[in-house]
Image (cartoon, rainbow, N blue to C red):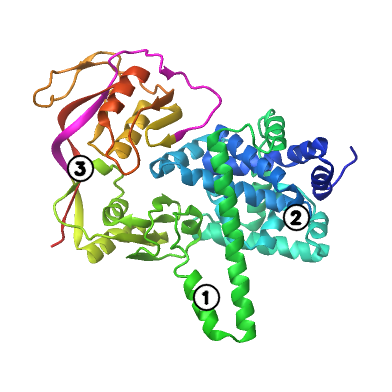
Amino acid sequence: MPELDDNALLRAYADRGSEEAFATLVTRHVDKVYSVALRHTANPHSAEEIAQAVFIILARQAKRLSAHPRLSGWLYQAARLTSVTFVRSAIRRTRREQEAHMESMLDENRPDLWRQIAPLLDTAMAALNETDRQAIVLRFFDGKSISEVGQALGATEDTAKKRVARALKKLQHFFRKRGVDSTTAIIAGAISAHSVQAAPTSLAKTATAVALAKGATVSTSTSTLITGALKLMAWSNTKTAVVVSIIVLVAAGTTTVTVKEIQKHRGYPWQTRQYDPNLLDTAPPQLAILPSKYGINGGFGQSLGGIMGVGEPATSVVEAAYQWFHLPRIVLETRLPGGTYDFIASGPNRKALKEEVRKKFGVIATVEPRETDIWELGLPTPGAPGLTPPAHSGQSHVARGEIVLKDASLSQLAYLLENMMRDRPILDHTGPSNEPVSIAKPAPGTVPATIHRAPAGKRYDINLKWDDGKEGQPHNIENLRAALREQLGLDLVPGRETIDVLVIKKAD
């Protein structure tokens, strides 16, 4: 097949069903899409799933996109938004671990600058306007010359050069505000050298096959990911349309209607229906705890930009302020206000969130040792077949009554179970020795149990399912205990132990 541009290839597929043309398109862009996903998830398996989802979306929307003036930029943006959707679906507690894991994945031989800007790059790209983002993608992700960038943007070579330089300045400013100071030339070199990594050799063929089938053979989780990504992409377009409509109204002189539209759609930019790490990372330094705008629990999270949450109860605001992410290990010694809140502590204001909690809710919190009921996670049957060595395929999934973890430790399992069930603290006593030990202080009326410990650092693929009832019903701890024994050879043994808890009390 002669060398065709992206649009010609997509038209060949959309008009004539040319699978060869679509396969060429996938091969041309798969490394870039995979690399964007890998920066977001720090997990090669998740990045492959996201890449497949992006190309399924491309196949489904081929007719509409065949006339898109800059398909390369569209693919980058689709990869970023699909990655955001994927990350949002994960339990918020794993975000810190994902960021640490991403740091460990970066090659130690790479320049220090890339290790610093890699976690920030896609958020910085999201802050650019569409034309600037297209210029950076074409120049440094796709490796186009300035002349080729100008042709793709419908501009002269001189204009394209200025556009790229201006976009690099914006990226430099974004990184500098977050403590990464470098020249635009060095930033450009780092992005050009490291932003796109080679995808697994089989991914292009796999992605092409599932995309040509329009996703008919993908898993439920991938199908859900595609639906969520399409919604986010549609919302991104809707926000642009709202801004354009406001500009038109202002130009027409309809001041009253314009103000109402702005008030309806704007609010505070970070007050959305769902926690968005991109909004947090691009927000100017600010500190606020406000009644929830939408009243819908959208979760909270943290990143290099700070910490924020939407639609969260007061307990979660305190939890975020004190960086205490163990829900069953919180003791209330005073009343907290009801309702839900949106909160943000970005930039240098992050540490000030404690003081804002004191002013807003009239409470402080301290970490204190308290004797409390606990569950102890143990290994009554070492070597059970339900704990398998890590494989090189599949993705993690967490839902009510189901936990699927890939390459995970038993401590991670205990942490997820504790914050999911919220029954009482779950202590991981499965490692690091193989010697059998007696459980800590047993609960009244129970017989002391003997557990075994797993080798230090041992990791598994874990697949656990149990009948946990429906949403809104109490969690079923006994069904969970039975499933742990039958499927994983683990047990939850009741006991009492002195552990650190966060005690929330009235401020003086």
Residue underneath mark 1: 261
Residue drawn where x is 16% and y is 24% of the image: 440
Q: Secondary structure at mark 1?
A: helix
- Residue 70, numbered label: 2
| In the depicted structure, whether residue 444 falls above or below residue 501 | above
Q: Is 377 contained in the magenta span?
A: yes
Q: Is residue 111 in view from this perspective?
A: no
* 227 horizontally vs 436: left or right: right
Residue underneath mark 3: 501
* 466 horizontally vs 146: left or right: left
Q: Is residue 447 in view from this perspective?
A: yes
Residue 176 position in % (x across, y down): 53, 59
Q: Nearer the viewer, mark 3 or mark 2?
A: 2
Magenta highlight range: 368-397
Q: Earlier in the sequence, mark 1 or mark 3?
A: 1
Q: Amino acid at mark 3?
A: Val
The picture quadrant where one finds residue 408 is top left
Q: Nearer the viewer, mark 2 or mark 1?
A: 1
Distance, label 3 to label 2, CA atoms, is: 54 Å
Q: Is 185 contained in the magenta span?
A: no
Distance, label 2 to label 1, CA atoms, is: 31 Å
Few, some or many C-alpha atoms within 10 Å of disc 2 (few <14, some 14-19, many ≥20)? some
Q: Amino acid at mark 2?
A: Arg
Few, some or many C-alpha atoms within 10 Å of disc 3 (few <14, some 14-19, many ≥20)? many
* 290 horizontally vs 15: left or right: left
